[in-house]
Amino acid sequence: MTPAPPPHHVVDALLAICLEEDLGGAGDLTSTAIFPVAHTSSGRIVARSAGVVAGLEIGLAVFDRIEGDVAATPLVADGSRVEAGTTLAELSGSTRAILSGERTCLNVLGHLSGVATSTREIVDAVSATAARVADTRKTTPGLRSLEKYAVRCGGGHNHRFGLNDAVMIKDNHVAAAGGVAEALAAVRSSVGHTVSIVVEVDRLDQIEDAIVGGAHTILLDNLRGDDLRRGVEAIAGRATAEASGSITAESAAAIAAAGVDVISLGWITHSAPRLDVALDF
């Protein structure tokens, strides 16, 4: 089932910025000079490489915001695996409008599909385990809602959306507070019992303080091999065990096999290679 897309107001605001960036005040000088208003064309958006689609209807919504009638019909659903050469959508209508919106549409579609494809790669790598794949806050500024939607299209899960929806005590919090126990005590005195609390640890001797202090999730940062397994054993089901830090498609399976509940990765949003998509008349 296709995940719920980002709210309309988020998409509308983003597309308005993207189109303003590309068209400015003068519009598409090339297409306006070559084609009269009444000129029409038809084309198709094609995946030139295999991957997972995300953001197709978001990208096609660009054409609703450009002067000139364009009929845009998606042919696959977000979350679908496609092979190279697959037609993703068909377009027909004003040549000027299609060409004016082409790059913005393809930029959105290619980037989000790249995020979904990278996410699915990790999901597939850990499929023999019970570990879930999650994103982080390492997102492109302004695109967080869309990139996290793409992660869901790839079969992954969302970590917190921002600083305001969960407590996450990281290394700098611990250093400034004087320790894990001190940071947790301050948090516990300030937030309600329904707020999720994550504590990042990079040493095994910090785990017990985190659990005793009431952490719901222990993030084992950059622990590998025997240290990671000992970390999971020390948590012993008393909190969610999460692994993070420089995890790749090649290392994900072994990390998941150590028994963690969640693997979180920043690169699936901030550095995912875009899916090669094109518009062919």
Image (cartoon, helix red, strand yellow):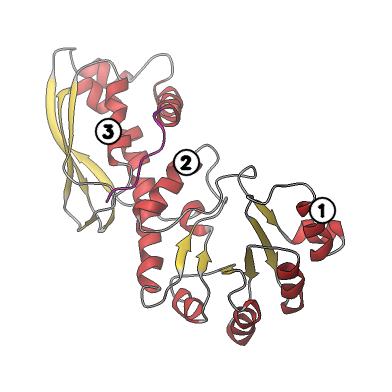
Q: Could you tell me how far apart the alpha carbons at marks 2 and 3 are, in whole angstroms? A: 18 Å
Locate residue 5, reporting x and y percent.
36, 40
Q: Which quarter of the rendering shows the C terminus?
A: top left
Residue assigned mark 3: 60
The residue that label 2 is drawn on is: 145
Q: Tag on residue 186?
A: 1
Residue at image coords 67%, 51%: 193
Q: Secondary structure at mark 3?
A: helix
Indicate left or right for 15 with 167 as reference.
Answer: left
Up the image or down, 226 lies above or below 86; here it is below
- Kindly state the secondary structure of the residue where label 1 is placed: helix
- Give the Cα separation between the discs numbered 3 and 1: 48 Å
Q: Is residue 61 above or below residue 263?
A: above
Q: Earlier in the sequence, mark 2 or mark 3?
A: 3
Spatial CA span between label 1 and label 2: 30 Å
- Amino acid type of the residue that numbered disc 2 sits on in the rendered structure: Ser
N-term mark: 3 or 1: 3
